[in-house]
Image (cartoon, helix red, strand yellow):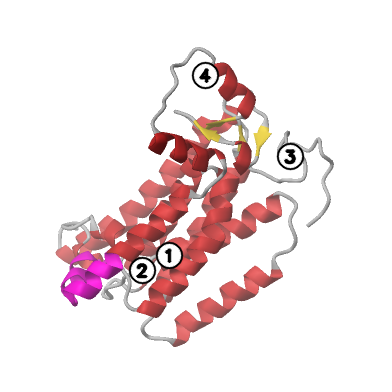
């Protein structure tokens, strides 16, 4: 990791040794995960929070207080929530046999009639090893990206990357039912590389090797959808590139428009391919 002067806009103004991608939505200063407080729009720095709460009534609920403490401490609550949902769904899959898996998996030909499968398939897994690998990768890369990007951007990255995996499957292997968060996970790994490079990080050779190994495993194993992997990988990199080019708060609308555009194009690919199989087009 290269050394950056404390006054760099890529470092937290309160912790000059910590790189961050997030700006306070009120004053525009760069803040790290520990200094962020979620707001109605984006996050605020400690000084802006104190100003906003000066005349606000105090909440004494112990539960709310603990949740706020975790959020202010930079806890990756979105990542933890995603892991919890995945584990819960897998438990339901295990208990119910194959019924739930069949009902929640993504299958391109019926996506137009059952569009919810685009989302539910991202929380469904085919084996214990499948979910263990995905959740481990989600914990490692997701937690760091959530602190760096902020919760809203991070969740958008995860969802759009997963949609990218479904779009790739629709184009390259439309007759294959698929399950798993792999598309979203590969999107996180690609985004981690792109954002790390944009913040002056190392060349990321180890991450590239990890991606290559997993991609090759997907190619040689018939039980793994390499199409979803490459779709998530490309889309995750594209979303991360958008983040790096629209970092300043003055470009928030451009960022939202770009992300919405990517998501709509991917959704259109899935639905059009489904319509073709159903004979609608």
Q: Residue furthest top?
A: 55
Q: Which residue is mark 4?
A: 53
CB under 8 Å between discs 3 and 2:
no
The quarter of the displayed image where residue 111 is located:
bottom left
Disc ID at residue 180: 2
Q: Secondary structure at mark 4?
A: helix
Left or right: where 155 falls relative to 195: left
Residue lying at 46% horizontally and 16% vertically, measured from the top left:
56
Q: Which mark is residue 15?
A: 3
Q: Residues within 10 Å of mark 3 (few under 14, many from 20)?
A: some
Q: Can residue 46 be seen here?
A: yes
Q: Secondary structure at mark 3?
A: loop
- Residue 278, position as x, y percentages in the image: 15, 64
N-term-proximal mark, 1 vs 3: 3
Residue segment shown in magenta: 89-107
Across the whole image, how many numbered discs are drawn on residues?
Answer: 4
Mark 2 or mark 4, earlier in chain: 4
User: Residues under labels 3 and 2: Cα distance?
Assistant: 38 Å
Q: Earlier in the sequence, mark 1 or mark 4?
A: 4
First in sequence: mark 3 or mark 2? 3
Q: Look at 54% across and 42% down and name the residue there.
A: 150
Q: Is residue 10 above or below residue 234?
A: above
Nearer the viewer's eye, disc 3 or disc 2? Answer: 3
In reply to whether residue 71 is colored magenta, the answer given is no
Residue to which mark 1 is pinned: 183
- Circles 1 and 2 in contact, beta carbons < 8 Å: yes
Task: Report which quarter residue 224 is drawn in.
Answer: bottom left
The image quarter containing residue 229 is bottom left
């Amino acid at each position: 990791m290269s050394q950056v002067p404390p006054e760099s806009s890529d470092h937290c103004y309160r912790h000059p040794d910590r790189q961050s991608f997030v700006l306070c939505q009120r004053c525009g200063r760069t803040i790290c995960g520990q200094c962020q407080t979620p707001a109605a729009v984006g996050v605020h720095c400690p000084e802006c929070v104190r100003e906003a709460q000066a005349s606000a009534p105090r909440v004494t609920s112990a539960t709310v207080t603990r949740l706020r403490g975790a959020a202010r401490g930079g806890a990756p609550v979105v990542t933890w929530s995603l892991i919890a949902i995945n584990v819960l769904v897998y438990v339901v899959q295990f208990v119910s046999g194959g019924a739930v898996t069949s009902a929640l998996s993504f299958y391109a030909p019926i996506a137009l009639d059952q569009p919810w499968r685009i989302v539910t398939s991202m929380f469904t897994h085919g084996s214990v090893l499948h979910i263990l690998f995905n959740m481990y990768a989600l914990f490692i890369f997701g937690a760091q990206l959530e602190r760096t990007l902020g919760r809203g951007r991070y969740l958008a990255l995860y969802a759009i990357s997963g949609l990218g995996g479904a779009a790739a499957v629709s184009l390259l292997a439309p007759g294959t039912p698929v399950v798993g968060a792999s598309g979203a996970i590969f999107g996180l790994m690609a985004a981690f590389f792109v954002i790390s490079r944009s913040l002056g990080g190392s060349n990321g050779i180890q991450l590239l090797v990890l991606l290559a190994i997993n991609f090759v495993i997907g190619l040689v194993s018939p039980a793994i959808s390499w199409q979803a992997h490459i779709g998530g990988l490309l889309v995750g990199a594209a979303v991360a590139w958008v983040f790096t080019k629209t970092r300043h708060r003055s470009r928030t609308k451009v960022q939202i428009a770009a992300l919405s555009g990517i998501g709509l194009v991917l959704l259109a690919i899935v639905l059009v391919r489904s319509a073709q199989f159903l004979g609608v087009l």
